[in-house]
Image: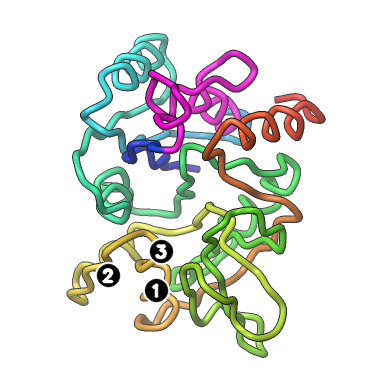
């Protein structure tokens, strides 16, 4: 399985808290969080790990280079953009088959991730498998709306959730080169990763299938970092 890590943002909340390193380098268990994620993906059968990395973060670029120099299958795709979808597109360029994309700060249940990977591998050519969770911790989550048949048919960012059960994006995306190519050929220009998910569900012929994680969250501040360490300490990662 190929994986894509999105590390193109600036991590402004950590900057405000006084961290001098870029967000992907913020430590979890004393190691850069992106390194913890890369190890996690290697344990889940990574053939290649493509990282969309912010060119304005030389410390991050040097760290990723050191991993590649050690022989790890890490490929850095430097980019400068404020559009998270552009980071996804640049990082996934050249991938023809299925891949799983994650934000650099995504925290997921390891055993559930095994099942998620299997669901992505088993999905059809015209299907995306998007991670969702009912664990809502983000102050501005990306809400999802499911059809009666159980497919994702719409997303909305922040504000009030859709009517019915509240379920939100888990920050993990099962996609394919075919889907990325089709979005470009359709002339769609998502303004963000959230907008891409909305367009994928509502404005393309692709089926968007949900996969529900019991718990999933992002690491946006020190509280989240400590929460991540507490949660991950349950597992052998």
Rate crowding at label 1 as few (under 14), some (14 to 19) or many (20 or more) other CA atoms within 10 Å.
Answer: many
Q: Position of residue 214 (x, y in %)?
A: 76, 55
Vertical order, 76 against 117 (above or below) = above
Between the C-alphas of marks 2 and 3, the distance is: 14 Å
Q: Nearer the viewer, mark 1 or mark 3?
A: 3
Look at the image and say whether residue 17 sits in the magenta stretch: yes
**In terms of secondary structure, where does tag 2 sit?**
helix
Q: Is residue 183 left or right of residue 221?
A: left
Which residue does the numbered mark 2 point to in the structure image? 183
Q: Position of residue 140 (x, y in %)?
A: 52, 60
- Residue at image coords 44%, 23%: 18
Q: Toward the viewer: 164 or 186? A: 164
Q: Nearer the viewer, mark 2 or mark 3?
A: 3
Look at the image and say whether residue 130 sits in the magenta stretch: no
* Image marks 2 and 3: residues in contact by CB distance under 8 Å: no
Q: Quadrant of the C terminus?
A: top right
- Residue at image coords 34%, 21%: 60
- Residue at image coords 61%, 50%: 117
Which residue does the numbered mark 1 point to in the structure image? 200
Q: Which residue is situated farthest in the right direction here?
A: 234
Rate crowding at label 3 as few (under 14), some (14 to 19) or many (20 or more) other CA atoms within 10 Å.
Answer: many
Q: Toward the viewer: 81 or 73? A: 81
- Residue at image coords 36%, 35%: 51
**In terms of secondary structure, where does tag 1 sit?**
helix
Which residue does the numbered mark 3 point to in the structure image? 194
Q: Toward the viewer: 233 or 38? A: 233
Magenta segment, which residues? 13-41
Vertical order, 14 against 119 (above or below) = above
* Image marks 2 and 1: residues in contact by CB distance under 8 Å: yes
């Amino acid at each position: 399985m190929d994986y894509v890590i999105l590390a193109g943002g600036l991590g402004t909340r950590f900057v405000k808290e006084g961290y001098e390193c870029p967000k992907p380098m913020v430590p979890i268990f004393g190691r850069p969080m992106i390194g913890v994620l890369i190890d996690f993906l290697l344990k889940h059968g990574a053939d290649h790990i493509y990282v969309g990395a912010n060119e304005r973060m030389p410390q991050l670029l040097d760290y990723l280079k050191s991993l590649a120099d050690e022989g790890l299958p890490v490929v850095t795709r430097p980019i400068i953009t404020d559009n998270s979808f552009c980071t996804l597109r640049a990082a996934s360029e050249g991938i023809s088959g299925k891949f799983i994309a994650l934000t650099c700060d995504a925290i997921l249940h390891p055993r559930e991730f095994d099942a998620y990977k299997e669901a992505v591998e088993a999905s059809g050519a015209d299907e995306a498998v998007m991670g969702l969770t009912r664990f809502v911790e983000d102050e501005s989550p990306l809400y999802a709306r499911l059809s009666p048949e159980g497919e994702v048919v719409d997303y909305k960012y922040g504000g009030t959730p859709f009517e019915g059960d509240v379920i939100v994006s888990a920050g993990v995306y099962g996609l394919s080169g075919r889907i990325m190519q089709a979005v470009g050929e359709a002339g769609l220009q998502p303004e963000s990763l959230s907008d891409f998910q909305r367009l994928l569900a509502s404005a393309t012929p692709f089926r968007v299938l949900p996969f529900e994680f019991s718990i999933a969250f992002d690491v946006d501040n020190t509280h989240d970092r400590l929460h991540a360490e507490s949660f991950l300490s349950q597992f052998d990662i």
